[in-house]
Amino acid sequence: MDQHRLRQEMANALHEEDVSLSPQERPRTRQKLIPWLRERVNSGQVPGVGWVDEPRGIVRIQWTRKSQHDYDVDQDGAIFKEWAVHTGRYTEGVDTPDPSRWKTNFRCAMNKSTEADYLRDQSQEQGDSPYRVYRLSPPSTDDAYQLMNGHRLSPVLDEDCELLIEPHYGSDMLFRTKPSHGCLLHPPDFQRNGFHVPAELVALPQYTGGNPHKREQYSRVFNHLDKGIVFRVLNNDLYVTRHCRVRVFCRMAGGKVVKLKKGAKTKVFDYGTFLAALQDYARTGVTHQRPETQVYLNIGQSDPGPPNSQALITVVLRHVTAEQRLRTVDESQPNMAKMCG
């Protein structure tokens, strides 16, 4: 892109409106644990878990203490880690591993579940090889599971979805963040001036690279990014609200490009649509288009897409649970996984 065209796009993108934010609540739901646990036990791929009496739903789970000198999280705490990954509370390479928290979350989930009974008299939580034994309730048709080529897809409303945000300057990723209660992405010199959102504040860093002309372009964008952009997960869908003066363009999953209206909460990723596409993909394999799980935002320019050297600021939004589900389908079909790379 030549400098004249870039300057023209920047001039067209900046304007002087102002809108205040109406706080939005974030409803959250929880994924059903017991049907998921049954599948993991049946897979035979998780160390430390297995049936004691499958017809009666009696399962044994290794309960090794992290304080043991030979503790190996991928062997002794595999089920706890998988539950953390499945619910989006842990992303490999992004979050700091916390085996103790994973175990606590899993234990609390089991204690709260009405579909599992802890059999204390059959368990052994002391000694060198501690374990717990649970009795799981029989599977119910009310679980609304759909079978897709051997892969089971759980209902939309039972999810607990999260968002991973990756801002880029040009083609260089700045950082990754996975906010737990929404995120306001704002410029380096952010001034509240009475402006408040119930979300985690995440600052873009100053741009220090390039030549003086390029730094001036970033400075102009930062100036008009004033009140920032809010990202949230609501009912498993991803929403973006632009509160800044600079225009923001979004390429949604599937390729549709929209310009975000200022102050309007815009759905940029529909999880129900993704699940329907995933079901078709799993049933027909490579003959059906592989669903997309990423959304691209371009700040101050009108050509959103994957980060590249011609773009100024690109924000990649990744739906954590959608990515995990797509990966599960790919892995369940070896030929498909090979073709998808």
Image: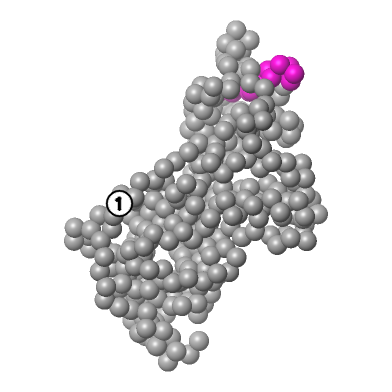
Q: Which residue does the numbered mark 1 point to in the structure image?
A: 23
Q: Secondary structure under badge 1?
A: loop
Residue at left offset 57%, top offset 26%: 69
Q: Is residue 202 above or below residue 314?
A: above
Q: Nearer the viewer, residue 215 or 258?
A: 258
Q: Residues within 10 Å of mark 1 (few under 14, many from 20)?
A: few
Residue at left offset 39%, top offset 45%: 26
Residue 132's image quarter? top right
Q: Nearer the viewer, residue 52 or 127?
A: 52
Say if the magenta span includes residue 58: yes
182 vs 16, left or right, is right
Q: Is residue 330 visible?
A: no
Q: Nearer the viewer, residue 264 or 340?
A: 264
105 vs 223, left or right, is right
Farthest residue, direction top:
121
Q: Which residues are magenta?
A: 52-65
Q: Is residue 338 visible?
A: yes
116 vs 4, left or right, is right
Farthest residue, direction front:
142
What is the x, y in percent for residue 210?
Answer: 42, 80
Label count reads 1
Farthest residue, direction right:
335
Residue at left offset 40%, top offset 88%: 8
Colour basis: one colour
| Quarter of the C terminus within the rendering | bottom right
What is the x, y in percent for residue 190?
Answer: 26, 63
Say if the magenta span includes residue 303: no
What is the x, y in percent for residue 251?
Answer: 52, 68
- Look at label 1 and name its amino acid: Pro
Residue 12's image quarter? bottom left
